Amino acid sequence: MRPQVMLFDEVTSALDPEVVGEVLSVIRDIAHETSMTMLLVTHEMRFARSFADRVIYMEHGVVAEDSPPDVIFENPTNPSTRNFLRAVLDH
């Protein structure tokens, strides 16, 4: 199989912390070895920031913000995005 697009839906959500890094490493390896488009639904914001070409923040099933990682992490325009990032990155 050689898919053009792969969806990762919270692949690390139920994993032990030590396994999360391994899974994210595999995803990064796949990205470097292929030209496949990847859609990654995650709460792993540090990984998303370092990995993504584009970050979309959704609230109640609606796109609240859609920007390159540096923009969304440094200067989010939506108050919900700012609150979410503050909550998850301050841990």
Image: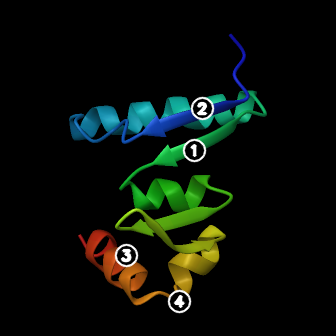
Q: Quadrant of the C terminus?
A: bottom left
Total labels: the figure holds 4
- Front residue of 62/84: it is 62
Q: Earlier in the sequence, mark 4 or mark 1?
A: 1
Residue linked to disc 3? 85
Name the secondary structure under disc 2: strand
Query: Which of the marked residues, 2 or 3, is nearer the chain's N terminus?
Result: 2
Mark 2 packing: few (<14 Cα in 10 Å), some, or many (20+)? few
The residues tagged by marks 1 and 2 sit, at their Cα atoms, a distance apart of: 6 Å
Residue pointed to by mark 1: 39
Amino acid, disc 3: Leu
Instruction: Select label 2 or label 3 by which is in front.
Output: 2
Q: Viewed as shown, does residue 46 lie left or right of 6?
A: left
Label 2 and label 3: CA atoms lie apart by 25 Å
Q: Position of residue 90 (x, y in %)?
A: 28, 76
Circles 3 and 4 in contact, beta carbons < 8 Å: no
Residue 33 as seen in the image, left or right of residue 7? right
In terms of sequence position, does the residue under pointer 1 or pointer 2 come before the other? 2
Residue 3 x, y percent position in the rendering: 69, 22
Q: Is residue 61 above or below residue 4?
A: below
The amino acid marked with disc number 1 is: Leu
Q: CA distance from mark 1 to mark 3?
A: 19 Å
Assess whether mark 2 and mark 1 are in contact (beta carbons under 8 angstroms).
Answer: yes
Q: Mark 3 vs mark 4: which is more N-terminal?
A: 4
Q: Secondary structure at mark 1?
A: strand
Mark toward the start of the polypeptide (1 vs 3): 1
Give residue 83's position: percent from left, percent from top: 32, 83
Seen at 40% across and 62% down, the residue is: 61
Q: Residue at x 67, y 35 (%)?
A: 31
Residue at label 2?
6
- Residue found at x 60% / y 32%: 6
